[in-house]
Image (cartoon, rainbow, N blue to C red):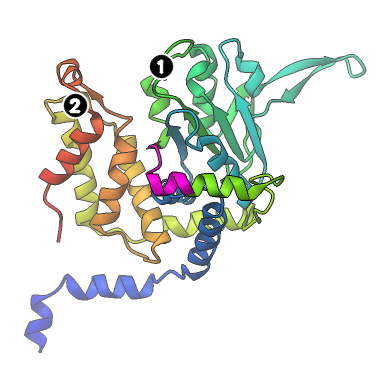
Amino acid sequence: MEENIAHNPNENPIENVNFQSRIDLSQLQESIEKIRSEISGVIVGQHKMIDQLLVAILSNGHVLLEGVPGVAKTITAKLVAKTLNIGFSRIQFTPDLMPSDILGTSVYDLKKSEFEFKKGPVFSNLVLIDEINRAPAKTQAALFEVMEERQITMDGVTYEMDAPFLVIATQNPIEQEGTYRLPEAQLDRFLFKINIDYPKLDEEILIIQKEHQLQNHGKLDNIHTVLTSDEIQKYQSLVKQIIVEPQLLEYIAKLVINTRENAFLYLGASPRASIAILNAAKGYAAIRGRDFVTPEDIKEAAIPVLQHRVIVTPEREMEGITSTEIIKQIIETIEIPR
């Protein structure tokens, strides 16, 4: 018996770590199910998108929703906000929008004979930015600091954002007139880019039925609050404690490094992408009630994390090959750790 134990030195420590670090995720799972139920009462289908939004919240990451008009991008963000008892603001980006319209501005107070900073709409917990690609580069750049460091600096003074702070942005991939392409530095600050497709026939019928049944009621009228600010921060802290084995950390690194060495990609993903996959994989594990990450969690996180962080070579782009297809190929070629 002693020899057998000696021959398996790696098994017992892992088991002991799992046992000692067991995390109670029952309340988190119950809350996630309630939010799913609330949103599903209004949004038909789109279960994958809803899960991705929930994972982003648990991972404390920002989300870019991309889809044609009318596929419920904005209403989904509003529904998520309604289920959370936190501050919410919506900013409609337009070509004439200035950075001060988002961040705030200093106003001279005649009574005090001094300048006073008036906070802009970005000072909230959940910020919905509609059509983020409609504002020029100067205005988009105003989001760099606040999205990455969750603070803004105005006139030499730093203002911290209240936690939790999350940005959900939407954009239309089809319309090009009056739009400005998001720079790579800004795209890199979004944890996920979520593509929203058209509904299927049965889903379209259900959408029409639900709209007919609403009569004079609004879509948000019957949505109940599920989580408070403190609970969100508590669950975000729990998610950070999810166990990740060393071979899975290596697996994440291999996925990201492969994007830099892939002949079909002009630009690969940065180390920020590796961290994003790690955090998102923990979020997927948590909503599934597991206190440990599996390769499936990583694979599911990889596409929404990487697809907006890489650039396809012009030759492949002309052939119609997308970054999503290349990332899927990379996932298939790298051996899954056992």
Q: Which residues are magenta?
A: 192-205
Q: Residue furthest right?
A: 111
Q: Is residue 2 above or below residue 224?
A: below
For the point 36% across and 42% down, the residue is 276
Q: Which mark is residue 181?
A: 1
Q: Is residue 90 above or below residue 81?
A: above
Q: Is residue 178 left or right of residue 337?
A: right
| Amino acid type shown at disc 2 | Ile
Q: Residue furthest bottom?
A: 1
Residue 242, position in %: x, y? Answer: 38, 60
Residue 105, position in %: x, y? Answer: 71, 18
**Callout 1 environment at 10 Å: few (<14), some (14 to 19), or many (20+)?**
some
Q: Is residue 53 visible?
A: no
How much space separates mark 2 and mark 1, taking CA atoms?
20 Å
| Amino acid type shown at disc 1 | Arg
Residue 257, position in %: x, y? Answer: 19, 36
Q: Which mark is residue 321?
A: 2
For the point 41% across and 16% down, the residue is 181
The N terminus appears in which quarter of the rendering?
A: bottom left
